């Protein structure tokens, strides 16, 4: 806002203040929501999607649709490429997680919240000691009690399974900036490097000092990064569309002649 750049932050279905996800596959529901946001905002001007983690996944999937009016994408720590041991553990669903999900007596809510308060800063920040208490509370609110935590665990397992077939990256033609973070404990920096390799025209930024949510570690730097990329992506996409429109006009004239 200070730079005069309009931006909209959204809560994906199933998170924050958004409505819960319906039963069934998750990614198609999130795709429909993302497409609706893009259509709504495209009326006002060029749209550049920037997403962290699952938001990065949804931004990439939106860019796979050639008809989507997107001018560029910033994908920050999107999962589904080379993930950490933690995400692989969730996918395998080992005995400790199965035992937790099948406990006959629920774990007391205060204990669940206490554990979440310790884990969340370590998972999301590069340096847990620098974590902002207000931001940590926003994330720990996802795990208020045993039932909610069990539901989130099942949701995570389903999502990891769906990510195995989530991408058609050869369809991504718009400018793409891939951000990989060296201190990310959920999605390794190697994941971002692989994404960059799979989309040859993309740009790659690796920051060894950032964690899984760099907008929490360094919001000023992220804001500047998004500002510069958005301006460049919009110019590039508009120039390509102008050339394509001119080519179509020439083709029509030739056919008419």
Image (cartoon, helix red, strand yellow):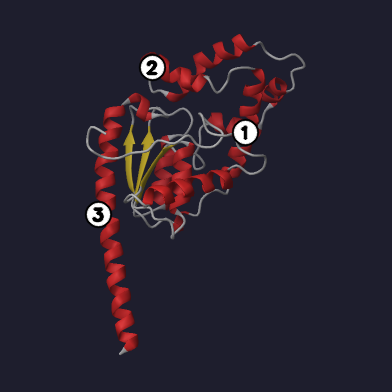
Instruction: From the top left corner, tell me how far across and down residue 248 is, in percent.
Output: 33, 75
Q: Position of residue 34 (x, y in %)?
A: 48, 45
Residue for badge 2:
132
Q: Are marks 2 and 3 in contact (CB under 8 Å)?
A: no
* 3D distance between C-alphas at marks 1 and 3: 39 Å
Q: Nearer the viewer, residue 10 or 208?
A: 10
The residue depicted at 43 percent of the width and 37 percent of the height is 77
Q: Is residue 97 left or right of residue 220?
A: right
On screen, residue 256 above or below 28 = below
Q: Which residue is mark 1?
A: 155
Does residue 139 appear to the left or right of 175 in the view shown? right
For mark 2, does the 10 Å Cα neighbourhood hold few (<14), some (14 to 19), or many (20 or more) residues?
few
- Does residue 132 appear left or right of residue 144 in this picture? left
What label sits on residue 235 in the rendered view?
3
> Secondary structure under badge 1?
helix
**Disc with the residue nearer the chain's start (1 vs 3):** 1
**Compared with residue 158, is residue 256 higher up or lower down, i.e. above or below?**
below
Q: Quadrant of residue 222?
A: top left
Tell me the CA gap for discs 1 and 2: 26 Å
Residue 145 at x, y = what percent? 62, 17
Give the Cα separation between the discs numbered 2 and 3: 36 Å
**Quadrant (top left/top right/bottom left/bottom right) for the N terminus:** top left
Count the marks.
Answer: 3
């Amino acid at each position: 806002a200070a730079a005069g750049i309009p931006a909209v932050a959204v809560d994906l279905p199933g998170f924050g203040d958004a409505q819960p996800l319906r039963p069934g596959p998750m990614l198609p529901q999130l795709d429909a929501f993302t497409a609706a946001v893009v259509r709504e905002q495209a009326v006002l001007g060029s749209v550049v999607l920037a997403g962290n983690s699952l938001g990065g996944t949804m931004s990439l999937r939106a860019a796979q649709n050639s008809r989507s009016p997107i001018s560029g994408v910033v994908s920050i720590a999107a999962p589904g490429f080379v993930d950490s041991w933690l995400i692989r553990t969730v996918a395998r669903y080992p005995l400790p997680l199965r035992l937790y999900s099948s406990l006959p007596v629920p774990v007391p809510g205060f204990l669940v919240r206490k554990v979440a308060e310790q884990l969340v800063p370590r998972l999301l920040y590069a340096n847990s000691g620098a974590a902002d208490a207000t931001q940590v509370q926003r994330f720990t609110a996802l795990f208020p009690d045993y039932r909610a935590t069990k539901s989130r665990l099942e949701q995570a397992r389903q999502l990891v399974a769906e990510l195995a077939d989530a991408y058609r990256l050869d369809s991504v033609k718009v400018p793409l900036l891939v951000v990989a973070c060296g201190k990310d404990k959920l999605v390794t920096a190697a994941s971002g490097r692989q994404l960059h390799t799979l989309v040859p025209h993309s740009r790659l930024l690796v920051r060894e000092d950032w964690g899984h949510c760099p907008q929490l570690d360094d919001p000023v730097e992220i804001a500047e990064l998004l500002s510069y990329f958005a301006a460049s992506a919009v110019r590039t996409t508009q120039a390509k569309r102008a050339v394509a429109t001119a080519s179509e006009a020439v083709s029509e004239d030739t056919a008419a002649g």
